[in-house]
Amino acid sequence: MAHVDTTSAVAGEVASRSPHRRSILGSIEAALGVLVEIPAAILVVAEVVILFAGVVARYALHAPLIWSDELASILFLWLAMLGSAVAFRRGEHMRMTALVANAGPALRAYLDVVATCAALAFLLLIARPAYEYAYEESFITTPALQISNTWRAAALPIGICLMALFALLRLARTGDVRTLLTAMITVASVIGLFWFAQPWLRPLGNLNLIIFFVGVVGFCVFAGVPIGFAFGMAIVGYLALTTRTPLMVLVGRMDDGMSHLILLSVPLFVFLGLLIEMTGMARAMVAFLASLLGHVRGGLHYVLVGAMYLVSGISGSKAADMAAVAPVLFPEMKQRGARSGDLVALLAATGAQTETIPPSLVLITIGSVTGVSISALFTGGLLPGVVLAITLSALVWWRYRGEDLSHVQRAKAGEIGRAFVFALPALALPFVIRYAVVEGIATATEVSTIGIVYALVIGLLIYRQFDWRRLLPMLIDTACLSGAILLIIGTATGMAWGLTQSGFSRALAASMTGLPGGSATFIAVSILAFVILGSVLEGIPAIVLFGPLLFPIARAVGVHEVHYAMIIILAMGIGLFAPPFGVGYYAACAIGRVDPAEGIRPIWGYLLALLIGLIIVAIFPWISIGFL
């Protein structure tokens, strides 16, 4: 009896201490979070200032700053890694919760801890290679600033360690010790099982691509592991267990994927979108568009399709294009009864629809690696985007043909005119941005800063709505969302490199060369292949890998190069935005702040509409080459 009393007393003491312990850990995590969030916010401001100063110095003063792009690139990797750490602390890395959400409370808690343990395992596995990579970079001196490249590369191990620390703090705050131990044992057992299976995996050759890039990724994604970490676990497992490649090489590929300067437009356009909303420009634009099309069933959905067509290609990044449009339209569309899942599905579909709109970075890449005229690609890319916009709009009409608009009054001509005059400074923004790119005033990366400065001036002087208290949270949100997107891109780049090294690209080209049936079969197989490739690769890596191999085959079977370029770009776009593996779909969900599970069902209809449009483009070459 005494033993029972003692046990009860100890249990009671532990129970009373546990909330206190979790409170202390929560305070430590909050303090560490501030130490990460403030520098991340400062980095967003620094990038805007540096890039805008570069534009002014080059275009207005004719004295270019030769160091601006280099400094922006250094700070960008820090922004990506600190933003990833902020996203990890907030639990805002994108994950598929379709199965987790339908589980019981106990299983859901278990899967959440498993997801954290899996992410921690990936971080621990690449922590040392990241440190070694940063050390190796110390022997490189940057050309403009003449400083050690370690100043840039150190962002990788530091960001990884910060995320690992946040993961440990989250696990330490887990209330149910049994759930924690079970989850840790589960993750350790799976990793151990693969480790001991190493002698059987190596002889399997390219079959390992399916085991790791389909099996492991699919299992992790549906178990609720954040997408970026699911990709990371797959490529780490593939390289460590089936090849002799040092993991430091993977860190280098992640660096390449995350710090590509064109991607700097992503956080800057994210911030621009938040700024447009805060300054009242968004409300002015939406009010005009609603007065113009608000009485039409599905009216604002048509506006979303058209807006993506207009802004596409400005930044060179689909994620940045979506970030420029979604914050403007989504709030009003939700107010009018649109479902979040349908909105993010249409946003993702328009991202795929506009892949061929110039000036597209994918078009430029195709021209550079295949020798096809870039001006011809730019001319040929306009009509295919229109065809896909029509098929998407047809589906919007069908889905919203019964929408109840009894509560919506048709605006009078005078109201539309007043709304247009009020919205004109805001509506001019996309044209200001495109003019700056076309006239060579700014690069695709720099142009977002012109938009930010324009929005600041218009918001302060014309709309006179600027809440300074919201500025810091907006900057932190920008860093957080950008970090979540960029980590996915970084690990996906690692997967793309793994596919290259496996020899898969050469095998694919060889198999397609001997296809029977001529050009029609070649185009059909190309569509299927690039839809699949687009789901596991970013567009540019896939083009670099397969463009030089397949374009000569297209010429040999009688397919016009520009026509073939449009087909494979649109096919890759469909794959890129198709769940469960498409990176673009999760970027759209992150930008729209929508759970990926909500968009799964509605997006298949939009993807079917895109596929129909792609088939039309493939059947009628004139759509691509009629104006050449």
Image: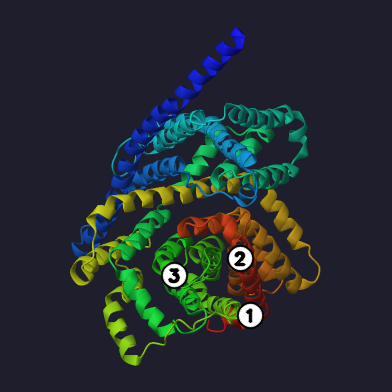
Residue 416 circle label: none
Dot in front, 1 or 2 = 2
Residue lying at the far front of the rendered structure: 1
Picture quadrant of residue 623: bottom right
Residue lying at the far bottom of the rendered structure: 413
Which one is nearer the viewer's eye here, 204 or 218?
218
The CA distance from mark 1 to mark 2 is: 27 Å
**Would residue 614 be visible to someone looking at this image?**
yes
Q: Which residue is mark 3?
A: 335
Picture quadrant of residue 5: top right
On the rendered image, what quadrant is the N terminus found in? top right
Q: Amino acid at mark 3?
A: Gln
Residue 88 in the image: x percent, y percent?
A: 46, 41
Label 2 crowd bin: few (<14), some (14–19), many (20+), radius 10 Å: many
Query: Which of disc 3 and disc 2 is earlier in sequence?
Result: 3
Q: How many marks?
A: 3
Q: Which residue is mark 2?
A: 603
Residue 11 in the image: x percent, y percent?
A: 54, 19
Q: Which residue is mark 1?
A: 621
- On the picture, is 560 further left or further right than 52? right
- On the picture, is 89 further left or further right than 174? left
Above or below — where is 616 with respect to 452? below
Label 3 crowd bin: few (<14), some (14–19), many (20+), radius 10 Å: few
Which one is nearer the viewer's eye here, 77 or 324?
324
Dot in front, 1 or 3 = 3
Dot in front, 2 or 3 = 3
Q: Residue at x 65, y 27 (%)?
A: 185
Query: Which of disc 2 and disc 1 is earlier in sequence?
Result: 2
* Secondary structure state at the residue bearing disc 2: helix
Label 1 crowd bin: few (<14), some (14–19), many (20+), radius 10 Å: some
